Amino acid sequence: MARKCRGEGSQDGARGWREATRCALYGPDGFYLRTRPAAHFRTSVHVSAHSALFEAAVTRLLAATAAALRTREVAFVDMAAGSGELATAVAAAAAGSHPSLSVRVYAVERAPEPAGLDPRVTWLPEVPDGVTGLLFANEWLDNVPVDVAETGADGVPRYVRVHADGTEEPGDPVAGADAAWLERWWPIAGAAPGTRAEIGAPRDEAWRRAAGSLAAGLAVAVDYGHTRASRPPLGTLTGFREGRQVRPVPDGSCDLTSHVAMDAVAPHATRVPQRTALRALGVSGARPPLTLAATDPAAYLRALSGAGEAAELTAHGGLGDFIWLLDPAGVDLADVVRLAGPLRD
């Protein structure tokens, strides 16, 4: 039976942030079921909409994964697909640049399938099981709901409870598996009053399920994140609406997001900044030579636009600070990296 989102919590309506976020984002009137992400924030996919640099880089990674697996039949799984922009672009790019590959493209999203979706893309509400290839989760984990803990005057971490208007209050002490997760990954017991942590265990489990769905291949999570050495003392929970950062209010009116404890998600995985990953996949912010402006002005303008998009994708203090978590299954990551250079069919 589906869990209800109305009338839950205590008599005054307060509940933990995990449940409040689940209802606000994915409940019957949830933010993500009645609106599309592109209306509220730009991902790397939206940034490179004109040049398709990001999509081309992901397609190159897919082809390298297929080569490392020694297969021509490969799947691409786009987690939290939004309106299917990345899935559609990868389907087109793979057909154009790697025609000998047989690529099955899946877009995984809770929202209904958008009208006019490319017929090469299969729309699913859950991750497909047992496929071989590349699973790519761009800004998914930050929207997996988590509880928030905060220390009081006694230094004890307590769950933060929240009302529909965003007003918070302290709840019970964090206990059980959540307390064990905090102790291992984000220890705040005994810290100054007001120190906060986002309890990332649900994200760890969500990633295990998603990455574990691959029969073989590479699972990649891309998100703003942090590691134990650099946890933010006040947490990162925030809201976004129509391109602006807003106060997080769990009423369905805004996106609710917090950065990801990437080292907890997959301790064994490789982590690199987005700027490093994209540059290795051929994305460069170098300006085109001025001589091109004289010989082919249209090409120069296209190249200049692409350089600007590449610079934004790899910028310090921006999208370049995203962490790419590379989690291989039955494939040697070193082989994938080696093969991700200029590829020829």
Image: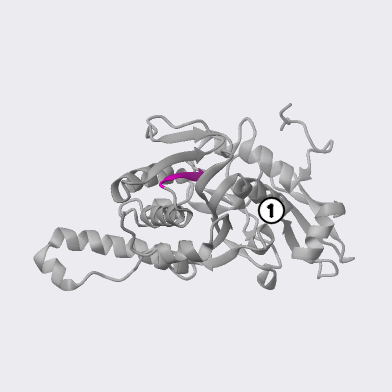
Which residue type does callout 1 highlight? Asp
Dominant SS type (magenta)? strand
**Position of the N terminus by quadrant:** top right
Q: Position of residue 47 (x, y in %)?
A: 39, 55
Residue drawn 84% across and 35% down? 11
**Position of 169 compared to 255: left or right?**
right
- Could you tell me residue 218's position as x and y percent? 53, 54
Q: Position of residue 309 (x, y in %)?
A: 35, 61
Q: Quadrant of residue 304?
A: bottom left
Camera sees residue 322: no
Label 1 packing within 10 angstroms: few (<14), some (14-19), many (20+): many
Which residue ends up furthest to the right in the rendered image? 154
In what quadrant of the picture does the C terminus appear? Answer: bottom left
**Element type at mark 1:** helix
Q: Nearer the viewer, residue 97 or 285?
A: 97
Seen at 61% across and 36% down, the residue is 30
Q: Residue sitting at 61 percent across and 46 percent down?
A: 210
Left or right of 185, for residue 304: left
Residue numbers of the magenta segment: 72-79
Q: Position of residue 78 (x, y in %)?
A: 49, 45
Is 73 in the magenta?
yes
> Horizontal placement of 181 versus 108: left or right?
right
User: Residue shown at 29%/47% (left/top)?
Assistant: 96
| Outermost residue, left side | 295
Q: Is residue 90 magenta?
A: no
Question: Which residue was labeled with disc 1?
Answer: 204
